[in-house]
Image (cartoon, helix red, strand yellow):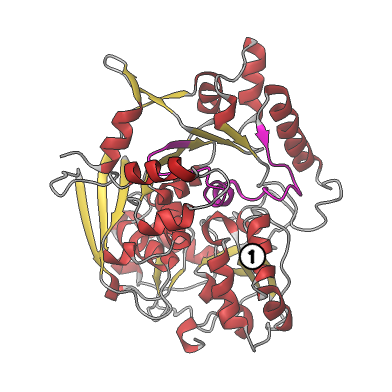
Amino acid sequence: MNTLFDKIWDKHVVQQVEDGPVQVYIDRLYCHEVTTPQAFDGMRARGIKCLRPEKIFCMPDHNTPTHDQDKPIADPISRQQVDTLAANAAEFGLTHFGMLDPRNGIIHVVGPERGLSLPGMTIVCGDSHTSTHGAMGAVAFGIGTSEVEMVLASQCILQQKPKSMRISVEGKLGKGVTAKDVALYIMSKMSTSGATGYFVEYAGSAVRSLSMEGRLTLCNLSIEMGARGGFIAPDEVTFEYLKGREHAPKGEAWDKAVAEWKTLKSGDDAVFDREIHFDAADIEPMVTYGTNPGMGMGISSRIPAVEDIPAASRESFTRALDYMQFAPGDSLQGKKVDYVFCGSCTNGRIEDFRAFASIAAGRKKADWVTAWLVPGSWMVKKQIEDEGLDKVLAAAGFEIRQPGCSACLAMNDDKIPAGKLAVSTSNRNFQGRQGPGSRTVLASPLMAAAAAVTGYITDPRTLL
């Protein structure tokens, strides 16, 4: 019996090139400002138009400032990239959600919340974290700029079919354990290359218990363990989330769509190339201590000793700890924090700000901590205000900024200064990722909030 990945993939195969790749039809292409200029230039040079412009949605997110968006962008490179995307979208007749458009935000937050990403779709974007959309029950993956051009021109892409992997997490998640912790735990066990060459289906009772926001977080981080993408079979949680959203089917079309979506699951006898099982009871709130997302541990653990690391990895392990100014055997609890960032395509949704506010409520931000709370979209910002979370956070000394990728990556004004330690809800802790010389500990919004109010890395369970 076929896996769900096989079902979606096979339905989208246009042709198999003999001794070569597969031509796959793409249902949705998302374009942001960083990876598209050369693709549009290529289209222009060849004098061709987009084959299916109605399937393509554009929005800036990486370079957008998170304050004063009504003023021209100060950085000339950022401004040029944002302006170029707007011009290209207009020239090629594509839908464009520009800055200050109420539909704008981080592309991987906007797609699901607007009902543009739907079960059974194939979805691509020139961005590695496109795997986020897999939470809707779609096959979604990042592509390169030349492939963006391929999809603009033909609405198809040439790909080798990846292998299939199922990761099952069974049991009940403990107090203070979020989807972010599940993802960091899986990476800590599998490393950043453990799923290379595979498309991952997440399954098991712990995964099914996650909200849609939690599922988006889990699928978002698939790429960080080397996977081509990750997805979760759609169920009642998916349908409930999508119902009534702007681009989701309506009326009779909705009923028909749901009936079809209910068939999107792997058969009981489906055979995967690899199966991995984890127990939810083994997962506690997680932190990273190194310079890749796989260098993670439970908050009550200590950094491993050098001799406990495989010989081939010891040099990079030592180098990472030197950069982070940590030592083998250290606990991260009690380490002084300079910056806290809550946001990104990993944790920039309403549930993440509810979690942050649950710890901030009735407390005060530590004086020396700079905190950036950045919603993933204008819709999320409105939800924060509608629920009064902005007032709860303001009383604790926090302000909500305007939407964008912000401090996830050093492409806009929100950069962590050299040497400073940030607890971040984003997806990557590479050297310099959040600013040259910056040091990043990846964690959940609960952990970030705990660090922001105490000023030190703190087990959030002690504050819940």
Residue 458 image position (x, y, % from top left): 51, 82
Q: Name above or below for residue 349 compared with residue 301.
A: above
Q: Nearer the viewer, residue 380 or 86?
A: 380
Of 267 and 411, the residue lying toward us: 267
Question: In this orientation, does residue 48 appear?
Answer: yes
Amino acid of disc 1 = Gln
Q: Residue at x 50, y 72 (%)?
A: 326
| Left-right relation of 23 to 434 | left
Q: Nearer the viewer, residue 448 or 329?
A: 448
Q: Determine the image quadrant of residue 90.
A: top right
Q: Quadrant of the N terminus?
A: top left
Q: Position of residue 460 (x, y in %)?
A: 49, 82
Measured as percent of width and height from the top left, residue 92 is found at 67, 23
State which region is magenta. Answer: 95-123
Q: Vertical placement of 463 versus 13: above or below?
A: below
Q: How many marks?
A: 1
Q: Judge whether 113 appears above or below 333 on screen.
A: above
- Report if residue 455 is visible in the image: no
How crowded pointer 1 is (Cα within 10 Å; few <14, some 14-19, many 20+) is rated as some
Question: From the viewer's perspective, is 428 left or right of 391?
Answer: left
Q: Main secondary structure of the magenta part?
A: loop
**Spot occupied by residue 148 in the image (x, y as percentages of width and height):** 54, 28
Q: What residue is drawn where x is 54% and y is 79%?
A: 457
Is 340 above or below relative to 224? below
Element type at marker 1? helix
Q: Residue at x 36, y 72 (%)?
A: 304
Using the rendered view, name the quadrant where residue 422 is placed: bottom right
Label 1 sits on residue: 383
